[in-house]
Image (cartoon, rainbow, N blue to C red):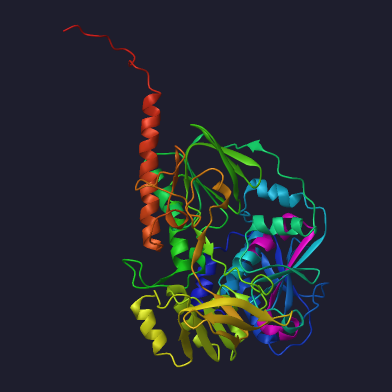
Amino acid sequence: MELSPQLLDSLRGYADKINKNVSFLINDDPHPKKESFLTFLNGIASIFDKLDVRIEETANNQYSALTFEIASDEKPTGIIFSGIPGGHEFNSLILATLQAGGSKINLDENLIDQIKQIDTKINFETLISLSCENCPDVVQNLNQFALINDKITNHTIDGNLYPKLVSQRDIQSVPSVFVDSEMIASGRISTANILKKLVDKNLLHIKPALPKKSNLPLQDVVVVGGGPAGVSSAIYSARKGLRVSVVAEKFGGQLTETIGIENFISSPYTTGKELTSNLLNHAKEYEITLKENVRVEDISGGDTKHITLSTGEIIESKSVIIATGAKWRNLNVPGEKEYLGKGVAYCPHCDGPFFKDKDVIVVGAGNSGLEAALDLSNIAKTVTVLEFLPFSKADKILRDKTRDTKNIDIILNVETQKILGDNKKVTGLRYMDKSTKDVYTANTSAVFIQIGLTPNSHFVKNLLELNEYGEIVTNDRCETSVNGIFAGGDVSSVPHKQIIVSMGHGANAALSASEYLIKLSATALPKKAKNTVKVNQ
C-alpha cells in the first residue's frame, strides 16, 4: 500500500514532533500482502529522521507476518498492530508513533494518575474494522494506556484480515475489546468507562478517586458536554470574557457517529467527524480549559457550584451549563442486552459489513432509521424496517429514496416484542401487528436499533427537574429548576433535536448564564463607589 504524495506532504508537518528513536518491529515471515505492508511502513518512516522499520522477532507476532510492534528507544511500548492500519486507523498509527516519540499524551492528568496506579498486567486485544468510525477513539485511548503504564499492552487487530479469529470469537460488532479472550466492551467507549468496566469485572483494582480541589481558579462557567450545544455554549461564554471550562467524556458526542449531514445551513454536505473537528478547532481559538475523557459525577453547592469529576477532581464555578446530549435509545425488550454485539447493533456504519449478503432488520423509520436502511441496503441481502407508528416521521427525501430501493421493505404500525437467538447470536425477531394483534416471527442475522435518543441526564436526576422523557426541564432562557444551572441541546426539553437547534440552544444558555453572572456580581457590589461624595442639591 503506497501512500499518496498528498498524505506524505501532510505528514511532513509532524516531522519534528519525534524526539526519541522509534521503530516499527516486524518479523521476517512471508505473507501475500508483505510487500504492500513494508511499502506502507517504510513510506511513513521516510518522513521522520528518528523512525525506522526493523525486521526482528518479537514476542507478539502471534497472528501473522502483518503484526508489528512500536518500540521507543529500543524498548517495547506495548502498542501492537495486526494488519495495515489504513482507513480510519491511519490516524491511530500516526498518533501512537508521535506519542511513542515523546509527543504529549492528551489525557487529563488525574486520569493519567489513575492509569499509573494499575499494578495488574493487562493485555488488551481490540478487534476493529478500517471502515469503523468509532474504532479509532477506542484504539487511541488504549494505546495511551500502554504508553502510560508498562504493565499494559494494546493489540489492535483488523478483523477483515483475520476472519478465523472473528469467527472463533463470534464478533459481530466493532470495536470489540478483549482481555484474556473475554470481551469486556463493544462499541464506542470512553477512557473513564474502560476503567470502570475493568473494575466492574474484577480485572483490576484501583484506589477510588479521592476528592481533591482542582488547581483551576474559580470558574465563571463550567460546561458539561462537548457536543454542538456544549461547544457553542463555551465559545459564547468565552466571547463574553468569562472564565470557561468544558468537561466531556468525548468531544463531539453523538455527532461523531453521524456520517452524512445534509441539513446544516451553509454547508450542503459535511460529516460528523468533520464538524466535530471544526468545533474543537474553533473552541481552541479561545481561552477555554478543555477536559476530555472524564465524567461529571455530582454537582452541588449554592452560589458557588462544586462539580465533582470521575477522577475525584472538584471544580468550583459560579454557574454550570449542562449540554451532555443524548445516546441511542434502547428497545428494552428481551434479547436486546443478551445479544448486544452478537447481532444487536446501534451503528450501521461500524457493524454493517459483518452482515454482507444477509437479511437484517432496522427498528425505527425516522430519519436515523431510514438512513441506516439505505446504508445497509448496499451491504445486506434484504433490509426490513419496522416502525411503531402508522407512518414514518422521516424527511420526504429519505422516504422517497427508501421507497425506490428494491431490497428495502417497510412495515408500519408494529410493535417489536422480542429479539431471538441461539445463545450465541441473533437469529430472528418477533413483532406484533398493532391493528390485527397478529404476531409474526422474522428471520434475521442482525437487528439495528434506530428509535431515537435518550438524554444523558442520569447524573442530575436528583438535582434538577426532569420531564417524563428524562429531559432537563428548561424555560425559554435555558434556566433549570436550580438557580445558576442552565441546560441546552438534546439533554434539555427543547422540542426539536437537530444539530443546528442544539448550537443555537447552547448559545442561548451561554447568554443567559452571562446575564445571571452580571446580576450575581451586581448584588455583591458596594452600595457606594470609592472616592465619591454625596452632593446636596
Q: Is residue 132 left or right of residue 153?
A: left
Could you tell me which residue is drawn at 57 percent across and 52 percent down?
A: 458
Numbered label tally = 0
Could you tell me which residue is drawn at 75 percent across and 57 percent down?
A: 200
Locate residue 14: give its quadrant.
bottom right
Of 465 and 518, nearer the camera is 465
Magenta-colored stretch includes residue 98:
no
Image vertical order of residue 193 relative to residue 439, above or below:
above
Could you tell me which residue is drawn at 38 percent across and 59 percent down?
A: 495
Could you tell me which residue is drawn at 50 percent across and 64 percent down?
A: 453
* Rendering coords of residue 250 (x, y %): 56, 58
Of 103 and 384, nearer the camera is 384
Of 325 and 267, nearer the camera is 325
Locate residue 196: give its quadrant.
bottom right
Highlighted magenta segment, given as a residue range: 140-165
Of 373 and 96, nearer the camera is 373
Q: Is residue 177 left or right of residue 389?
A: right
